[in-house]
Image: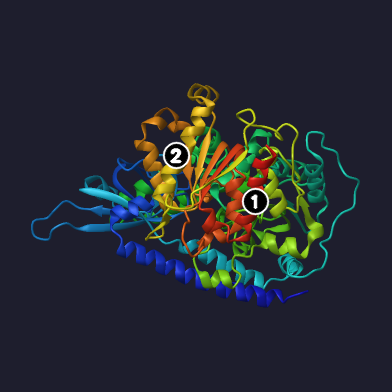
Amino acid sequence: MTESPILALQQQRMLLEIEYNVDKEEHRRQMEAKGLERLAKRGDVWLNVRFSRSYYNSLNQLSVEIVRTQDNDIEHNFEFGRPVYIILIEKQNDKNGKKTKSINGTVSYVDGDRMVVTVPDGTDTVGMQTAASLYVQLGFDETTYRLMFEALDRTIGARGRLGYLRDLFYSSQKAETFTFAPLSFPFLNVSQERAVNEVLRAKDVAVVHGPPGTGKTTTLVEAIYETLRRENQVLVCAQSNMAVDWISEKLVDRGINVLRIGNPTKVNDKMLSFTYERRFESHPDYPQLWAIRKSIRQLRANRKRGDHSFHQKLERLKERETELELRIRNQLFREARVIASTLVGSANRLLDGMKFGTLFIDEAAQALEATCWIPMRRATRVILAGDHCQLPPTIKSVAAMKGGLDKTLMQRIVERKPEAVTLLKMQYRMNEAIMRFSSDWFYHGEVEAAPMVKYRGILDLDKAIEWKDTSGDTSHEQFVGDNFGRINKEEAQLTLLTLAEYFVRIGRQRIIDERIDVGIISPYRAQVQYLRHLIKKTDFYKPFRKIIAVNTVDGFQGQERDIIVISMVRSNEEGQIGFLRDLRRMNVAITRARMKLIILGDSATLTRHPFYRRLKEYIDSLSETK
């Protein structure tokens, strides 16, 4: 079936407009209605910050470094590219009381308790140093929406290659391929080798479908490496900064020259060394450029009235500045084999005018279709990698989701062009029993456990999966407002008690010596925060705090642990399970475990849904065979 790509994209634009309005209104409401303390707990505000220094970065932007002095154990939502307001509370004036002043900026990077924000030229940095107090608040991200709208408009009106790809992706027409004998890669398994060959054969599009633990990144890195034997340069994008960092690091390990546009989330020397800013600053011509920029600033600051030579001097300096800047930039881009950025980051002016033979999009199943069209205008063909049976894009508007905004480009291509899809079938993470249910439910039973992990476990004669039923008086869910969702305190306490019992069975010393790591997952943020609070105040867990991570399902995407414990929270007589109905999230949760999976949940509530009923039956059947 062929649908009109123009009408479909116009419909998508309308749904995106609904999402934009809902998101903006929700942000406004939260910022107005909630106290700063509440916003800080949500991770949307840094309270108690102090000004550290100001300087001009390599892109000649005025940058302010601020340091958080409290609340450092709270996770936050600040990351590269997010808009923020720096709020200055000035010293009290007897007549007028306290005055506040707001400065707009953009996060340049965040590392631990240190944040760098780029601010407009001429910003009062002295005022920041003398203010009675400072705090930083997340702004609403207009830029990302603007870029998505522009990308959809451009694609709707496109001709040439972009128009061809648009029409192809919305039709059942087969994607074109090259013909050549398959290449052999001895260190890849059969399905990984096939995936790399399919990527190399694709003229238009190929999809690498990577279920949990199947080595999607390994396969993608090999596909990029092989593509670079045929092309001089490729563009590699992903939805999140973290995903871009991960693939960039693996490419650097392979000896590939990567140029990272935008700053990495984990700021260490290895990551920084391939960012555009660090490479720019390390260039031998940079000191000369810095000196010219300093001269320009001094010239402007010391301009005298009636100085007729001012404009002439300024123009001469600016010409030299532009010439040097372009020379450094061109050399960096000429030498790089991979340009890496987020999907939104690919709109960076540094890439203006650039074209690529191949665009690779990692974690494509987590990206809204509109964001994928942002870099697509730069490419001849596109390779998507991800898993549409894991986490979907985040959408706040129920109406937009029901209208189909959550349908990703990867899903669309998987449905319409099955011949372009390669499923990776061998997983290297989980015990066979943990993997089997996910494989049968989501992947038609095609995913198998590699021999070296098939029987992996911590204890002899141990069951790889357990369901601890919290039905009855031991479980009561409560609703907590402000987007924190639900909490079940009795189940949280039982979760930690169950884990403690398992720790005792393993032996405290062995856990520490072997660094057996643990993930405690709950779909609800309120439950996550309550579990963290309980672990902090429970003496038993003191020696183990470094090896236990507690987070939401989204927080564990792309991670794995020896032991995973899941607190399901929902417990009610009506059988209401809310967004636990999104089974892709549960697929992520249950496939994080290498050797042991423990689920705590009210079976009376959950098993009214066929997925959880089948999961419970599967786990019970494993117990019977032991």
Position of the N terminus, as image quadrant, is: bottom right
Of 345 and 212, nearer the camera is 212
Of 478 and 339, nearer the camera is 478
The residue labelled by disc 2 is 496
Q: Is residue 624 left or right of residue 229?
A: left
Disc 2 residue type (three-letter)? Leu
- Can residue 621 be spotted in the picture? yes
Marks 2 and 1: which is nearer the front? 1
139 to 515, vertically: above or below? below
Q: Give the quarter of the image for residue 113.
A: top left
Question: Where residue 423 sits in the image (x, y, percent)?
Answer: 76, 50
Q: Is residue 145 left or right of residue 485?
A: right
Which residue is found at the position 69% from the left and 59% from the top? Answer: 410
Determine the secondary structure under disc 1.
Answer: helix
Disc 1 residue type (three-letter)? Glu
Q: Could you say which disc has been placed on residue 617 in the image? A: 1
